[in-house]
Amino acid sequence: MKHLLIFTLLFLSCAIEAQTITCSPLDRQAVQTKIDETQGLEQPDFGQTLVAVGKTFLKTPYVAKTLEIGDTETLVVNLQGLDCTTFVENVLAFSLMLKEGKTSFDDFTKNLETIRYKDGNLEGYTSRLHYFSEWIANNAEKGLLKDITGEIGGKEITKDINFMSEHRDLYPFLADDTNFEKIKASEKYLNSQPICVLAQDQIAENEHLIQSGDIIALATSINGLDVTHTGIATREADGRIHLLHASTGSMEVEVSEKPLAEYLIKIKGNTGIMVARPL
């Protein structure tokens, strides 16, 4: 009877984990490999740590919509293909592990959940921080970073954020009416909060205020949307700030060939950037 109870408890714990985490054996091994690979990369400046960890992902393929899996929201662990947001999330998660002196798979998934979800808790599809301006604000509330856009010349803008509810058909999870109403509520909250943007034509003159490791979010003129792309600032050998990111151009993680200010000029609809500094 005792052995049966133990077996039952073990089965339940495995089932619960399977319901909340989606991770292939290959990716679980990739997490451990990345933990080993990043040991010794911690720098006195946390921003430099992020860049060092981020560069271990160079050449990783860009893959869109890696989180849109199955019928239930789970914590997706996927290091084989990254989009711009999951790249930043994974780099921050591994960098925090270095800072905290932690080395287990569970430590990694805990960090990833904290970063990816509202208030750090996975509670369904709508708990994911879908809009990146909200991602910045919520992670600032957690004490993980600080929105410094206003400190480096950014100005508050007014814009209706409603892209997801206006394009419901693009998001399979929004076929569920409960999810749809919760997303609309999130958008309503977002629209009550100011968004600060450093205009594209003012980036070059304020570039000296951006540091390696700062998280860069590309603001857009697209109706209903706040941000179209994100990455990590890195000051390269030319003394200029470049963007370390999962690129839709090269379809892999790269450092932009051109400095950030010049790189953004070719981005259709770009209006400027938001800048968040990890703490």
Image (spheres, rainbow, N blue to C red):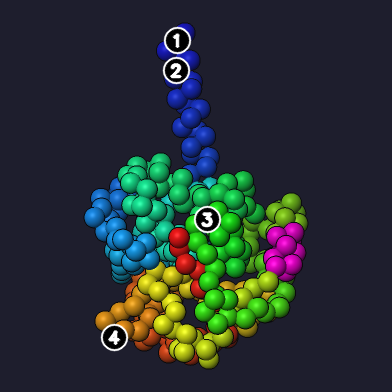
Kindly indicate whether the residue at mark 2 contacts the one at mark 4 (C-beta within 8 angstroms): no
Q: State the residue position of label 4.
A: 238
Q: Secondary structure at mark 3?
A: loop
Magenta region, residue range: 184-193
Mark 2 or 3, closer to the camera = 3
The residues tagged by marks 1 and 4 sit, at their Cα atoms, a distance apart of 67 Å
Q: Which mark is residue 143?
A: 3
| Residue at image point 55% right, 58% down | 139
Q: Upstream in the sequence, badge 1 or badge 3?
A: 1
Residue 264 in view in this figure: no
Q: State the residue position of label 2.
A: 6
Task: Tell whether 12 sits left or right of 222.
Answer: left
Look at the picture and state if 264 lies above or below 167. below
Quadrant in which residue 261 is drawn: bottom left
| Residue at image point 72% right, 74% down | 160
Q: Upstream in the sequence, badge 2 or badge 3?
A: 2
Mark 1 or 4, closer to the camera = 4
Q: Amino acid at mark 4?
A: Asp
Kindly indicate whether the residue at mark 3 contacts the one at mark 4 (C-beta within 8 angstroms): no
Kindly indicate whether the residue at mark 2 contacts the one at mark 1 (C-beta within 8 angstroms): yes
